[in-house]
Every structure is written in structure tokens, then in C-alpha cells.
Amino acid sequence: MTDNNTKKEAPPKRPQCAFFIYKQEVYQQVKDANPGKKMTDITKIISEQYKQLPKDKIDQYEQKYKDSKAIFEKEKKTYEDKYGKIKNERKKKKGGDTQATKKTQNKKQKKQESEDDESSEDDD
């Protein structure tokens, strides 16, 4: 029987991929060199820089990812042994329908309308 007074700790977080490790290291420097740029533009610049890195540098970031992943796997096993399998639940956004959901609904509605139009033409 579990003790109700002990809170279940948060599961370990998945490790960042090699690119995100690189991005985290250079983001502020690139942002300072490109004042006024949006975050998405800065990320594109960093992405291009990452693609231009020599293979040995990319391999270093890949190794950092592999090391982090090995630690994550150990922590995950310890967590799952203690609390059970980690549930892959995504946080739901507040406010109901998201923009993506609305787009999907609009596409379905337009498709249905076009199918209705085609079937009414067939009736003629």
C-alpha cells in the first residue's frame, strides 16, 4: 500500500537532441549579434550554422546527446520501478479549440461541401 503523504515525483525529462544542445550554447551570442530579429529567425540562423559545422564538432554534440540519453534511460528505469510506466500525456492548452484544430475542421467542412456539390451534380 502506498503512503498518501508522499508525492509522486516528476518523471525524468527526455534529453535534448544534438541540435538543441548546440542551440542552447550559442543562442545568446547569435541573438546579441542579430538585435531585433525574432526568435524564429535566430533559430534559422543557428540551424544554418549547425549544418555548416565540421563533422567532428557535430559528433561531439551527438555524443553529448548519447550520454544524456544513457542517463535518462537509467533515471527512467528507476522511476518506472518505483511508480510504474511513464504516461505520455501532453498538456492540453487552455481555451478550447486551437488554431490547428480549427484549420482541420475547416478543411473537413470544405471537403464535405465539395462532395455534396458533386453528388448534387450527379443527380441532374
Image (tube, rainbow, N blue to C red):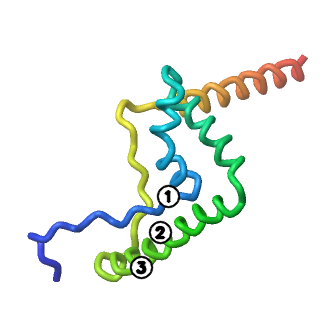
When the figure is inspected, residue 30 is found, relative to residue 122, above or below; the finding is below
Given contact means CB atoms under 8 Å apart, are the residues at marks 2 and 1 in contact? yes
Rendered residue at 30%/76% (across/down): 83
Q: Quadrant of the C terminus?
A: top right
Residue 100 position in % (x across, y down): 56, 32
Q: Is residue 107 left or right of residue 118?
A: left
* Residue 74, label in figure: 3
Query: Tag 1, which secondary structure?
Result: loop
Reading the image, the residue beneath label 2 is 68
**Mark toward the start of the polypeptide (2 vs 1):** 1
The one nearer the camera, 109 or 46, is 46
From the viewer's perspective, tell me whether residue 74 is left or right of residue 122.
Answer: left
Instruction: Say which residue label 1 marks.
Output: 16
The residue that appears at 39% across and 47% down in the rendered structure is 91
- Residue at the left extreme? 5
Question: Viewer-proximal residue, 111 or 8?
Answer: 8
N-terminal-most mark, 3 or 2: 2
Classify 10 Å Cα crowding around label 3: few (below 14), some (14-19), many (20 and above).
Answer: few
Label 1 vs 3, first from the N-terminus: 1
